[in-house]
Image (tube, rainbow, N blue to C red):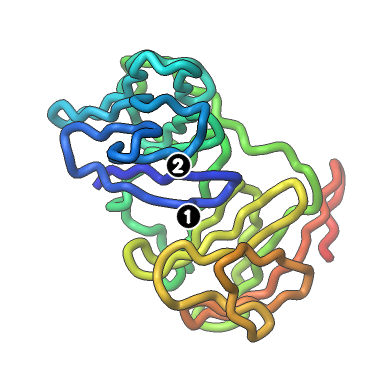
Amino acid sequence: MAKLQVILDGSVVDEFRLTRGRITIGRRKNSDIFLDSPVVSGDHALIERIGRDVYLEDRDSTNGTKLNGKPVRRQKLRFGDEIRIARYTLHYCDDDAPAQPGFEHTLMMKEVRSGGGRVDTRPVVDAPTAVRNPPPVLGPLGVLSVLTGGNAGREITLIKSVTTLGKAGMQVAVVTRKQEGYFLSLVEGTQSPRVNGQEVGTQPRALQVGDQIEFMGVHMMFRHQLVTSSTSKEA
């Protein structure tokens, strides 16, 4: 099923499954997707499903709508597209896609790139390919080392802006990469992640090197991976 993930300041703050033919986006309280910002128009944008195709339409908004970094009036959406409205990013994706083999069977890890998320391998016949580059390295890269379970020893380099842990519809936590570091927060469910034995509260928890993380029965450790042009060093 197609859905939109609403991302604000690098964190997934809401998620909407596109089950209706028309989804309104704007600052009006009765909008299907309400974006609380003075620079968002009351009737800002529209998501419309026609058959199997889904379209994004700007509703003559004051400050415009961008699709993959470019202003848009009306455009067919593809999985992985990124819609930008004011400070909000709406990531268009499909939560019915199967998890990849390995660690994802136990703890689903879905990384969202700042340029648009999952790579779409389908031929592009109706629009030019959008440029989707990973964010620039602003500091040491974070790494999650899996310590327990059948995937002990696996490591995940947190190069993306948002890495989602858990299972959609049940328990979901995110590790967000920001200029000032990495942050862990719960976005769905009641089973809060634990850091060094303490539950993460309602606010994002800043991660430090050596922090022990427990989520959905899996233990992990956070550390930094320092990368240079010729060699890699780990902290």
Can you give x and y, in whole percent of width and height, for residue 25 in the image? 34, 33
Q: Relative to the observer, which residue lies in front, 233 or 41?
A: 41
Q: Identify which residue, 70 or 230, lies in the foreground.
A: 70
Distance of mark 2 from mark 1, alpha carbons? 9 Å
Circle 2 Cα neighbour tier, 10 Å, few/some/many (<14 / 14–19 / ≥20): some
x then y, percent, for residue 223 = 75, 67
Q: Is residue 146 left or right of residue 229?
A: left
Q: Amino acid at mark 1?
A: Lys
Instruction: Give the labeled residue for mark 1.
Output: 110
Q: Which mark is residue 118?
A: 2
Vertical side of 55 occupied by 210: above or below: below
Density class for disc 1 (Cα within 10 Å; few <14, some 14-19, many ≥20) is: some
- Image coordinates of residue 140 in percent, x first then y, are 80, 53
| The C terminus lies in quadrant | bottom right
Q: Residue at x 45, y 42 (%)?
A: 118
Asked if one can make out residue 152 in the rendered structure from this viewpoint, the answer is no
* Amino acid at pointer 2: Arg
The residue depicted at 66 percent of the width and 51 percent of the height is 177
Q: Residue furthest bottom?
A: 197
